[in-house]
Each structure stands twice: as structure tokens, then as C-alpha cells.
Image (cartoon, grey):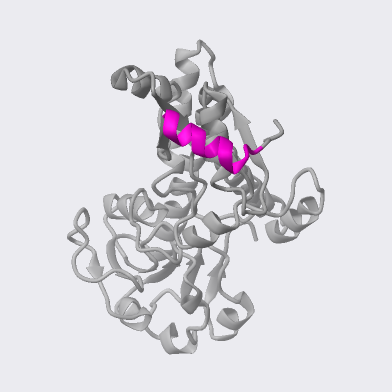
Amino acid sequence: MAKLIFPTSGEVRDLLIRDSVVVNKSTVPVGSTRVVENVLRRPDVHVVSNPEFLREGTAVHDFLHPDRVVVGADNQEAALRVGNLYSSLNAPIVVTDAASAETIKYAANAFLATKISFVNAIAAICEGVGADVRDVMRGIGYDKRIGHEFLRPGPGWGGSCFPKDTLALLKIAERADYQFDLLRGVVDVNIQQFNRMAERISTAAGDRGTVAVWGLTFKALTDDLRDSPALEIIRRLMQMGHSIRAYDPTVRGELRDFPDVVVCESEVEACEGSDVLAVLTEWENFRWVDPAAVRDLVSSGCVVDTRNLLDRSNWRAAGFAYQGVGR
């Protein structure tokens, strides 16, 4: 990591007088910084790449307590000026060229997607050999080279960043004349996970059965439905002929792209007249629903918990057949 040496206040004042800086915070194709510079055609304006690493639901905290700050520019003075804005934060500041800064963002998201796909693949193996994926992930997570973050299985990854950034990095690799088969495999495993979860829920529901869905957003603590794994699974279930009754704390009214989905006002209402219950988003309030309150509403008595959120002992004690992921 390059060592950042901050200019004095006088030097910063001189720089402000002399030149201006345009900061690009967005995730953009590698080379965009130079494209903007060529469009501006202003020798007195420097373009700096300063990508964000913010999670939906915790963006303010992430901004104030970053793991690192990345600043990339072909003009070192411009990079120093932007880096100086973060001098009060207790975080490493990585100063590099513009292309490297732009690539860092794509590489970070692709690596996180890779971890999730790896965990979901291991979860499938655990189910086949009788292992518990939670214990397996706990065991490998203590290795400092691996860590515990992003080692939880689920229905697959989605959201506004991972899908587009992995596909973008594949396109970047293609233009760089590199066949990125590893990342293509990560995407393929994710699609397989959507299919596996949909097939599991469909089997439990029976032919053209009604599925009660808890959770529609791509993750908890956000109202974002973009590329939600829950919606990917719902789409597959509907193609199989299933009806969907869904509840999500942030969703009201009709789903624009899924008008046939009945959006309910509560977890209990979603279960009314259902044949199976599927937990697709890890909202904390789902954990505290009394299983006895919905047992008689779910005809098959089966819950498919794609987030391993529920206490399976409690749900089994209430008469449910509990199915998690990798357990």
C-alpha cells in the first residue's frame, strides 16, 4: 500500500487556487476517469476515482468507519487533495492510479460473490454427506486467511451491485483477452442455487401448491427489490405453476413485475391457505414468530428456511418439518 503524505494547509490552499478536482464515486468501467478527462478537456481540472464501499442499510456507518479508502488518479497532487478529505478517519488510505482504483471496486465485489457461491456449494455437499454447514464455516472461519465474514449459506446472492459488477468484470476480462472461467463458475453456481431452492420449495408445496413467502427484498434492513434472490426464486416457482402469498416489512401493494403475487399485511396472513412456508429474506422479526401460530395454516407442515434464520428445534417442536440450507 502506498504511503499517503498529506500536504500542509498552505499547500492545500495553493492547490485549491490553482486547479479543480472532479471526484468519481460511482462504480464505472475501468478507464472512465480518462474518458471524463477527455470530455472535459480542461488542463486545470483533474479527475479522481474514489469508489464507495457502502452497504445498503448501513451506509452511514460504513462511510464513517471504512475498512479502507481508495483514491486513484494519474495526478498525484489531485489524489492527495482527495485523500486529505478523509484524514480524520481511522482507516488505511490506498493511493494508486485511476485504473487500479476502478478495478479495486469490481474485484472486491466479485471476491465477495465468490465467497458466497463457495459457501452455497459447500452447503450442497454438507447436505449430501450429513454435515452441518454452520459448523463447517465456523471451523474454516477461524483461519485468519479466510475469516468469518460472508460465510453464511443462503438462497443465492443478488442486489444492486453483485450481479452487475460480476458481469462487468467478466466483460472487462474479455476485453483484456482473459477467459475468466473462475468468475463464470461463480455466476453459474449462483443460478444453480436459485434453481435448487425453487425445486426444494416446489417439492414441499406439491403440484401447483400455494407458497407462503417471508421476505421479498434482496436482504434485510433495506426496501431494495433490485435483483433480489427472493424474486428470482418466486419467478421460478410461478413458472412451475405455484401461487405465491408473500409478506415483507417494507413492501406494500402490488409488485410491479409480479402482479399475480398476493402481498399480505403480516407473516400470519401470508401463511393462510398455503401449502409450504419459505423464508427468503433474513428479516429479524421472522425469527420471533410463534410457529404454533401458523402451523395449522400450512397444509404440508413444511418450512424451507433458505436463510437458516429460524430456530429449527422450536419449529420442529411445533410440528413443522424444517428444511434449512446445508443442514
Viewer-proximal residue among 262 and 116: 116
Residue 12 part of the magenta segment: yes
* Quarter containing the N terminus: top right
Q: Is residue 94 above or below residue 304?
A: above
Viewer-proximal residue among 45 and 156: 45
Viewer-proximal residue among 75 and 26: 75
Q: Which residue is at a point 55% across and 28% down the rendered structure image?
A: 77
Residue 184 visible in the shown view:
no
Q: Is residue 135 above or below residue 176?
A: below
Prevailing secondary structure of the magenta residues: helix
Residue 322: give x, y in percent of width and height.
55, 71
The image quadrant of residue 249 is bottom left
Identify the residue at the far top of this view.
Answer: 177
Q: Which residue is at a point 29% across and 20% down the rendered structure image?
A: 39
Q: How many numbered marks are there? A: 0
Residue 135: give x, y in percent of width and height.
75, 60
Residue 129 visible in the shown view:
yes
Residue 182 part of the magenta segment: no
Q: Which residue is at a point 48% across and 89% down the rendered structure image?
A: 292
Q: Is residue 113 above or below residue 257?
A: above
> Which region of the structure is painted magenta?
6-19
Residue 278: give x, y in percent of width and height.
43, 66
* Quarter containing the C terminus: bottom right
